[in-house]
Image: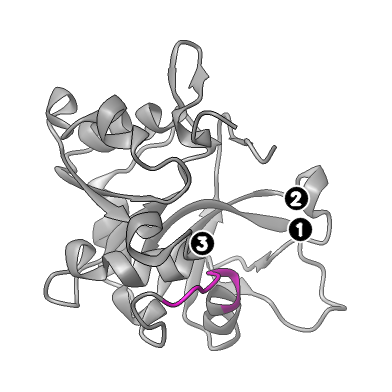
Amino acid sequence: DATPKPLLAVHGKPLIEYHLEALARAGVREVVINTAWLEAQYPVVLGDGCRWGLTIHYSMEGRDHGGALETAGGIAKALQLLAPTSTEAFWVVSGDIFAPGFDFAAAHVAAFEASQDDAHLWLVPNPGFNTRGDFALGPSGRLQRGPDTLPRPWTYANLALVRPALVAGVAVGQKAALGPLLFASADAGRLGGQALGGTWENVGT
């Protein structure tokens, strides 16, 4: 009630700080943080990012639109910061997941940029809160959604590389979920993915 979830401390530091540290280690230098609930706390706690060697930009959804725009809506609002020429690939990570060992490696970016995919997702075996799953993962790293009768043993881990085209149909200020866009890309054969190893927790409640 008093603290935005990504700013809750885990092992002595805010959840989101683990992502900021990992991004900086991987050579990322600019980060956009989408905010809504209690958003005035983010700049106070995180500042401009210089302590990690980053430049942090804040996309204030609460101030500008009266509340959170969901993931696709948030990406669309921040797209000019994320992809100034409308072509750059960028990382997307939820601030309320705990994956301290994830490597935002430049090699992942290069491999994604060499593909024609709309996005590349990291996946975890279905957790208890999503037993039906999101995707089937093919042997060549292709994600499939298919009919409801298809087994879907994998859940999107809220870590992805994304191209602007994924949210091309979302207007600035529009509230829009990311899931349906990912499912449509999978059905069109434009979604890649791989299993995520190591510690991962979705701090859902």
179 magenta-colored: yes
Question: What residue is drawn where x is 39% and y is 66%?
Answer: 65
Q: Are marks 1 and 3 in contact (CB under 8 Å)?
A: no
Q: Residues within 10 Å of mark 1 (few under 14, many from 20)?
A: some
Q: Earlier in the sequence, mark 1 or mark 2?
A: 2
User: In the image, which residues are magenta?
Assistant: 174-180
Q: Which of label 2 and label 3 is nearer to you? A: 2
177 magenta-colored: yes
Report helix, strand or loop for mark 2: loop
Expressed as whole percent of the image width and height from the top left, the position of residue 190 reads 47, 81
Expressed as whole percent of the image width and height from the top left, the position of residue 94 reads 47, 47
Question: What residue is drawn where x is 52% and y is 52%?
Answer: 158
Instruction: Provide the residue designation for mark 2.
Output: 126
Q: Earlier in the sequence, mark 2 or mark 3?
A: 2
When asked about the image quadrant of residue 179, the answer is bottom right
Q: Is residue 15 above or below residue 107?
A: above
Q: Which of label 1 and label 2 is nearer to you? A: 2
Magenta stretch prevailing secondary structure: loop
Expressed as whole percent of the image width and height from the top left, the position of residue 99 reads 50, 33
Expressed as whole percent of the image width and height from the top left, the position of residue 160 reads 43, 57
In the rendered structure, which amino acid carries the disc numbered 1?
Answer: Pro
Determine which of the numbered discs, if any, sits on residue 193 in the image.
Answer: 3
Q: Is residue 63 left or right of residue 174?
A: left
When asked about the image quadrant of residue 199, the answer is top right
When asked about the image quadrant of residue 1, the answer is top right
Q: Earlier in the sequence, mark 1 or mark 3?
A: 1
Per the model, the C-alpha gap separating discs 1 and 3 is 13 Å
Determine which of the numbered discs, if any, sits on residue 70 in the image.
Answer: none
Q: Is residue 70 left or right of residue 74?
A: right
Q: Are marks 1 and 2 in contact (CB under 8 Å)?
A: yes
Number of marks present in the image shown? 3
Determine which of the numbered discs, if any, sits on residue 153 in the image.
Answer: 1
